[in-house]
Amino acid sequence: KNIWIVGSSIPFWAGELAATQPGGRNLNLSARVKWHTIRGLQWHQLDPHILQLLKNSPPPEFLVVHLGSNDLTTQGLTSKKLIKEIECALLRYNALMPKTTLVWSAILPRLYWHGAPLNSGKKIEKKRKTINRKVRSIVLDLGGMVISHRNILAKFTQLFRHDGTHLSRTGNELYLKNLEGGLLAFLSNTAREFS
């Protein structure tokens, strides 16, 4: 089976760490895991990225999407607009790749949101939770699967790098465990959601 992981710097750095560990980038799974990540990626840039990938390879069995953190601080991009943008993209991928199972990897919290107005952390956190909740039900309705990373919380500061944005080594190890656990459950058809 082929699995694509697409997204921004969270999966990018996790993939770099996975490459140095036993089981490597395939995460100990009996599948080929391809990490198609771009640091700083935003939702409006995902379509051309996916279309380019599909030009060169057949669709994967699973498409894991970890994206959205970099959109939360975009001026004028409300939760409603972003949810609509995500929903339209997911519907397109469902039509483009009917045999591919979509996997939503929830947007993680941060200790510090780059580009956000001062003291707006609480507002962004609320937006993040709203988007995760709404997109979760969209993905499940489309027959997809969800990895919710409920064990990665802002209060566990050791999970984050000193920049407050990216995950530390400990955080990345936990993130990889979540991905591996979720994908294992999905591959063996034992769950549709992994927290």
Image (spheres, grey):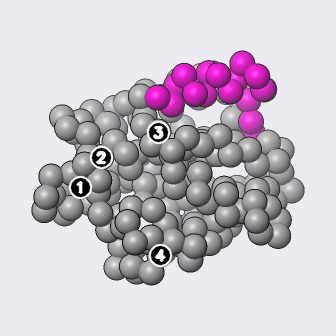
Along the line of sight, the residue nearer the viewer: 172 or 81: 172
Q: Are marks 1 and 4 in contact (CB under 8 Å)?
A: no
Within the image, what quadrant is residue 58 found in?
Answer: top right
Provide the residue designation for mark 4: 159
Separation of marks 4 and 2 at Cα, in angstroms:
20 Å
Disc 1 on helix, strand or loop?
Answer: helix
Disc 3 on helix, strand or loop?
Answer: loop
Amino acid type, callout 1:
Ile
**Magenta segment includes 59:** yes
Q: Residue furthest right?
A: 30
Which portion, as a residue range, is magenta? 45-62
Task: Classify mark 1: residues with Cα within 10 Å, few (<14), some (14-19) or many (20+).
Answer: some
Disc 2 on helix, strand or loop?
Answer: loop
Disc 4 on helix, strand or loop?
Answer: helix
Which numbered disc flags the more N-terminal residue, 3 or 2? 3
Give the residue displayed 77% in from the left and 69% down from the top. 21
Q: Are marks 1 and 2 in contact (CB under 8 Å)?
A: yes
- Does residue 125 appear in the picture of this structure? yes
Q: Please identify the dominant SS of the magenta region.
A: helix
Q: Are marks 4 and 2 in contact (CB under 8 Å)?
A: no
Along the line of sight, the residue nearer the viewer: 187 or 28: 28
Which numbered disc flags the more N-terminal residue, 3 or 1? 3
Within the image, what quadrant is residue 36 found in?
Answer: top right
Provide the residue designation for mark 1: 124
Amino acid type, callout 2:
Leu
Separation of marks 1 and 2 at Cα, in angstroms:
7 Å
